[in-house]
Image: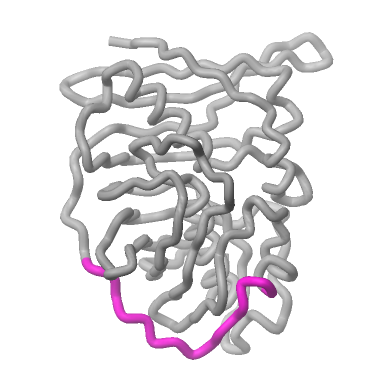
Amino acid sequence: MLRPLPVAIAPWPEFGDHRIAGKAIVPAVYLLDLMVRAATDAGLIVQSPLTLRAATFPRFLPADEIERCAFDLAAEIARGNTRLHLSSRITLPSGIQRTRDHAILTLGNAPTLPNPPEIVGEFDVSAERLYRELIPFGPRYCNLRGTLRLGHGGALGTVRSPEPGFAQPSLAGCPYLFDSAMHLACLWGQRYAGVVAYPTGFASRTILSSIAQGERLCVVAPRSQDPRGLSFDLWLLDEHRRPCDVTLGLSMAPLAAGSTPPNWIVRPDRQRSL
């Protein structure tokens, strides 16, 4: 059964702070939040904790195209599974209408969640330098804080949402925290793989405790590196180091003509291999 869900995206000024290759892009975390809110309102999500599975982000949504787009969110319900599919329709200057997929995921049950590893650091970077030199986002999306610790086995840092955050949390939790946690994975990739990689999806994400805004400790652990990109597990922990949000198999890949990290961040023994 295919069920359309009402969805709309407003051209928020803050999207201008989220730039990839110099272009303002709607964050994937915003699209995830939008999809979860719509599915919750439609009664398709009732369980907590919430688990999202097999998520992919096939194509960026440029912020300057929002007002020229019509958006479609479809829920495909089959054999007890619910698959959400967000796409846009845009009319090009030539008059041709193009449909583009932006986010696809399946609502599912929580997998077995591993505990985060202990990170043995060998290199520290300040969050301020990260956003000044490595991930040049604007203020609303610069939410890692303090000193970020990196080692071969992963990275550790603090993420804090900006204020004001979202007025009401969705079951997907604060999007700013998850977005910044992925910045920490990007930082690890620059240091140990020599690439600037962006999220393309994840195997599963389980939100055990959602908040509208606040602070979390973030732990990122690499899983694999191959010609397709990098893969990580990611934990957001509360002040007692209890897991609140666990993502397994976060996939990240460099753009085809993407930038390379500066020499100071890349380990001398690591070459660009992706």
Judge by depth and name the residue closer to the eye, 192 or 44.
Answer: 44
Judge by depth and name the residue closer to the eye, 237 or 5.
Answer: 237
The residue sitting at 53% across, 27% down in the picture is: 101
Residue 190 located within the stretch drawn in magenta = no
Could you say where residue 13 lies in the image, as x and y percent from the top left? 72, 36
The residue sitting at 45% across, 83% down in the picture is: 151
Could you say where residue 20 lies in the image, as x and y percent from the top left? 70, 50
Q: In the picture, which quadrant includes the N terminus?
A: top left
The residue sitting at 37% across, 34% down in the picture is: 105
Q: In the picture, which quadrant includes the C terminus?
A: bottom right
Q: Is residue 7 above or below residue 21?
A: above
Q: Quadrant of residue 131?
A: bottom right
The residue sitting at 33% across, 37% down in the picture is: 171
Q: Say whether residue 211 is left or right of residue 165.
A: left
Q: Quadrant of residue 39?
A: top left
Could you say where residue 148 lies in the image, as x and y percent from the top left? 53, 77
| Image colouring | one colour
Q: Is residue 55 above or below residue 44?
A: below
Judge by depth and name the residue closer to the eye, 92 or 61.
Answer: 61
Q: Is residue 195 above or below residue 89?
A: below
Q: Say whether residue 150 is left or right of residue 267.
A: left
Residue 125 located within the stretch drawn in magenta = yes
Q: Quadrant of residue 92?
A: top right
Q: Is residue 69 above or below residue 114?
A: above
Q: Which residues are magenta?
A: 115-129
